[in-house]
């Protein structure tokens, strides 16, 4: 395993622990009647900073081994089921969060709708770019395909594909930038209490996915032998 990937998996494990601790703090603060606006704002800023940190360490990991980040093997199985370019799909997260933020003002409803639409458009553009990269890689490999070539010639023929493959790192970083941008934009739309509830709902959602993965792994296995 690449040392950069090993370091990332360790850092991600710490990040999950921190996110779960922060989610617990948010839940307690929102339930308490005496929590001040300043305390909630500090918790919201801490939560956003935690996600910023995740995107930074993912960017470094993608430079070390982009396939590892894309595969999502560092996440739980249920999280991987929803994976999009190495992370969550921003528009889907907005769909999940919106009901947890009500009541929203008319202005907020329109702003959230616009944010969801712009996010979906940006996601489509990135997905199309990924498809184009896949097509380009396939064409690059097939252009030099010779099943009777010696290994050295085969390796030389795939060198151009390796260069093109470096573009995959850019897609991961762009996808994370989109995730980061939408979280920040959502924060600007919402009140402090709504933003706290949104971060709580997001953290709780990921915790539920990890819990689902644990339950799935611990399920009784049916014998293949009748």
Image (tube, grey):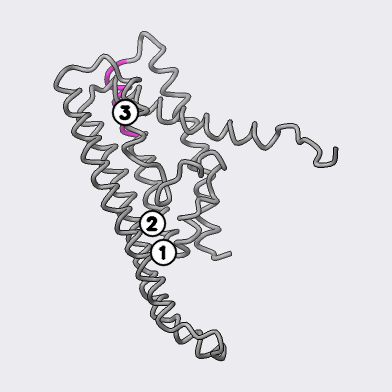
Residue located beneath label 2 in the image: 59
Within the magenta stretch, is there residue 39?
yes
Mark toward the start of the polypeptide (3 vs 1) = 3
Q: Secondary structure at mark 3?
A: helix
Front residue of 149/169: it is 149
Residue located beneath label 1 in the image: 63
What residue is rendered at 25% in x and 35% in y?
A: 116
**Quadrant of residue 92 in the image?**
top left
**Quadrant of residue 96 in the image?**
top left
Q: Residues within 10 Å of mark 2 (few under 14, many from 20)?
A: many
Magenta segment boundaries in residue numbering: 36-46
Q: Secondary structure at mark 2?
A: helix
Front residue of 26/103: it is 103
Within the magenta stretch, is there residue 26?
no
Residue located beneath label 3 in the image: 42
Pointers 2 and 1 in contact (C-beta within 8 Å): yes
Which image quarter holds the C terminus?
top right
Q: Nearer the viewer, mark 3 or mark 2?
A: 2
**Disc 3 to disc 2, how far (Cα)?**
26 Å
């Amino acid at each position: 395993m690449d040392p950069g990937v090993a370091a990332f998996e360790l850092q991600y494990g710490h990040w999950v622990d921190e996110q779960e601790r922060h989610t617990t703090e948010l839940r307690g603060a929102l339930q308490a009647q005496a929590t001040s606006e300043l305390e909630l704002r500090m918790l919201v800023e801490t939560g956003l900073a935690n996600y910023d940190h995740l995107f930074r360490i993912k960017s470094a990991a993608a430079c070390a081994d982009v396939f590892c980040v894309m595969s999502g093997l560092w996440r739980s199985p249920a999280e991987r089921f929803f994976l999009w370019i190495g992370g969550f799909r921003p528009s889907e997260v907005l769909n999940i969060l919106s009901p947890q933020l009500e009541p929203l003002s008319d202005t907020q409803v329109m702003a959230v709708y616009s944010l969801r639409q712009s996010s979906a458009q940006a996601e489509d553009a990135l997905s199309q770019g990924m498809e184009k990269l896949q097509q380009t890689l396939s064409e690059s490999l097939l252009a030099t395909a010779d099943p009777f070539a010696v290994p050295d010639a085969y390796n030389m023929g795939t060198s151009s594909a390796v260069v093109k493959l470096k573009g995959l790192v850019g897609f991961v970083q762009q996808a994370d930038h989109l995730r980061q941008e939408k979280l920040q934009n959502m924060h600007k739309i919402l009140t402090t209490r709504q933003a706290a509830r949104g971060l709580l709902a997001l953290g709780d959602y990921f915790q539920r996915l990890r819990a689902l993965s644990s339950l799935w792994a611990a399920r009784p296995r049916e014998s293949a032998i009748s």
